[in-house]
Amino acid sequence: MIGVLASGEGTNLQALLDAELPVLAVASDRHGTAALERAGTRGVATAMFAGDSFPDRSERDGAMADWLQARGVQLVVLAGYMQLLTPGFLDRFAGRVVNVHPSLLPAFPGLHAVERALAAGVAVTGATVHLVDEGVDTGPILVQERVAVLPGDTPQGLHRRIKRIEHRLLPGAVRNLLTDRAAA
Ligand code: GRF
């Protein structure tokens, strides 16, 4: 059973929902995100864990882990979640947190990966799905795919093409993890 954390537009969440993966719960750190609306439309449980509602990040992450586990979530997918998770959260879902990132990791980890790839003048960037550890986009890579940078590309246009790849890679990787767990 899957819990998704998302801060933004939620197109990767949408890809998981469209793939009919068992998404049970969606949490965000931001009010009024499209991701929460997409989940609500499908009748999936949603919750908001805003930073300013908690004394610190580990309290926030603890409350979020409680909420996810109370709903039976076993696998957590970060689908455009713009916060770093604290070690306490990662311990509670050890080896069971997945992230999608818009570059060919280990190139361009962290924020603004698409803009930085363009600024660096690379000919090829891509999308990566990986397991999350305590570093910034450093965990074991599950799958990645190349995306060519085109002449005159804008960050928006390039990111749109990368997301199209993400929308295929992420549901596939999540489905494989669920199958592996079921077989274990
Ligand atoms: C994606 O490009 C993902 O790789 C990055 O944030 C973006 C989220 O997009 N971590 P969306 O909210 O799923 O549309």
Image (tube, rainbow, N blue to C red):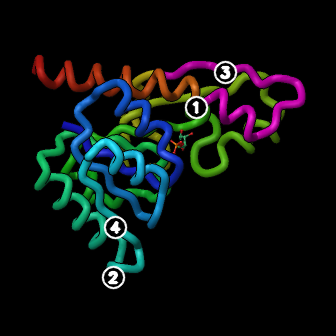
Front label number (3 vs 4): 4
**To which residue does mark 1 refer?**
163
**To which residue does mark 4 refer?**
49
Q: Position of residue 68 (x, y in %)?
A: 20, 53
Which is more toward the observer, 99 or 7? 7
Inspect the image, locate mark 3, and give the three-letter code of the amino acid beneath it: Val
Q: CA distance from mark 4 to mark 2?
A: 12 Å
Q: Position of residue 168 (x, y in %)?
A: 47, 21
**To which residue does mark 2 refer?**
55
Query: Residue at horizontal 73%, vertical 20%?
Result: 148
Q: Which structural element holds mark 2?
A: loop
Q: Which structural element holds mark 3?
A: strand
Q: Is mark 1 within 8 Å of ligand 1?
A: yes
Inspect the image, locate mark 4, and give the three-letter code of the amino acid beneath it: Phe
- Please determine whether, in this image, residue 105 is positioned above or below residue 86: above
Q: Is residue 103 left or right of residue 57?
A: right
Query: Residue at horizontal 51%, vertical 22%?
Result: 144
Badge 4 local density, few (<14 within 10 Å), some, or many (20+)? Answer: some
Q: Which residues are magenta?
A: 144-163
- Residue 173 figure quarter: top left
> Disc 3 or 2, which lies upstream in sequence?
2
> Disc 4 or 2, which lies upstream in sequence?
4
